[in-house]
Image: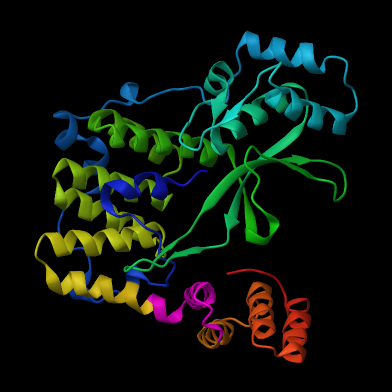
Amino acid sequence: MHNLTKLLKNIAAIFTFLLLVSCKQMPVQHAYSSDITEFQLLEGKAILGYSLMQSELPEDDVLSISPEMALFVRENLGNTSNYFAKVNELSRSIFDKNKLGLVYDPLATYSARGAFENSVGNCLSFSFLYYSLAKEIGLRVQFQEVHILPQWDLSEEKLFVDSKHVNVRVNAAGDRDLVVDIDAVSPERQIDYTILDENYAVSLYYGNKGAEFLMADNIQEAFRYFVKAIRLDYDNSAHWTNLGVLYRRAGYDEFAEKAYYVALDFNKDDNAALSNLAHLYRQTGDDERADYFSDLVKKYHEDNPYHYYYEAKDAIKDANYKNALHNINKAIDKNKNISLFYKLKSDILTELGQISEAGRALRKAQTVSTDTF
């Protein structure tokens, strides 16, 4: 699974809370007030002891293929001429234990060549590998990011975690596009998807690798990889948030603060940045600002329909169906266009013996627009 926030959550409590906050609407007393610049964040003197040079940034040739990879596709697909047959045969050849035998590992981020040579990778690694080999044999492919049904951690903090996933869409005539994946997400958990350009997808590689280096306490190498990710996709707020985590871990709180605010400048909804700002201010004794950002997170619990959906599911585990019905009704009040809510309501009503009402809820689930957040 591609999710930089998830990779780093054990480092600095980075969770994604979906709420709407505009930096432009932020009260003056809570806006960024120091004088550290974006240039200083990327220059790296605090981390490296000198100014980072362009030539020091990693160049991992994420999408390139080796002669061995070219030979692999020739040997396994050389006699395949049908377009759709190529799509399926390439996937089979990648996973076949007698051929490449690629194995899924959610924490193994590799380039296309690295995934091929190690026969292991996560969804991002597989996507690079398939994409590169597919282009070699003339397939029309795009990266896509799948947005997955949010999950609510019903621990004491009740943290909301937004999961994302990358796979490959193979373009074909008409409506016959195909999706290839190493770890398919069940249809009921998929919300929608976004087509990604190459730069964005490759920046995710450098961001993930930076996270891996950071977890291994290799601060300087993590810095180089995070900067590379930002250079490839400058306005991706997640990269700036992770750079802030790096500075925070290295002991440079003022630099971390600036990085989080840059993230919010690019994406007012970067909730990982908001969460980390609250954490930073709490740790540094600025309780007024910490309370401000913490209150935003708390307010989200009251406004987010998925919070009540997961409260309902939690009540079902305890066979407390009346409480479950109360919570699923609150979820529907917040958003009346999510069929998943009505399906759960139908299940709850069935348990309560309200069969006709359960049928109505199920019919409603079939008529609402779509499962979008």
Quick one: which residue is furthest to the right in this view? 82
Q: Is residue 149 depicted above or below 369 in this figure?
A: above
Q: Is residue 304 magenta?
A: yes
Q: Main secondary structure of the magenta part?
A: helix
Is residue 230 toward the left or the right of residue 287 in the image?
A: right
The percent position of residue 231, horizontal first and vertical second, equals 40, 37
Residue 48's spot in the image, x, y percent? 18, 29
**Camera-side residue of 191 and 67:** 191
Image coords of residue 23 (percent x, y): 33, 68
Quarter that holds the C terminus: bottom right
Q: Nearer the viewer, residue 201 or 312?
A: 312
Image quarter for residue 170?
top right
- Residue 160 occupies which quadrant of the picture? bottom left
Task: Please provide the residue range marked out in magenta.
Answer: 300-321
Residue for point 32% across, 31% down: 213
The answer to whether residue 222 is above or below residue 337 is above
Q: Residue 8, image x and y in percent?
A: 34, 45
What scheme was used to colour the molecule? rainbow
- From what the image shows, is residue 77 above or below residue 252? above
For the view shown, which residue lies furthest in the left direction?
285
Total residue callouts: 0
214 and 139: which is toward the camera: 214
| Left or right of 345, for residue 177 | right
At horizontal 65% and vertical 72% (from top left) the residue drawn is 340
Q: Which quarter of the picture shows residue 364?
A: bottom right
Relative to 260, is 329 on the left or the right?
right
Question: Foreground residue, 45 or 183?
Answer: 183
Q: Is residue 347 magenta?
A: no
In the image, taking residue 38 as reference, residue 195 lies left or right, namely right
Q: Residue at x 58, y 56 (%)?
A: 147
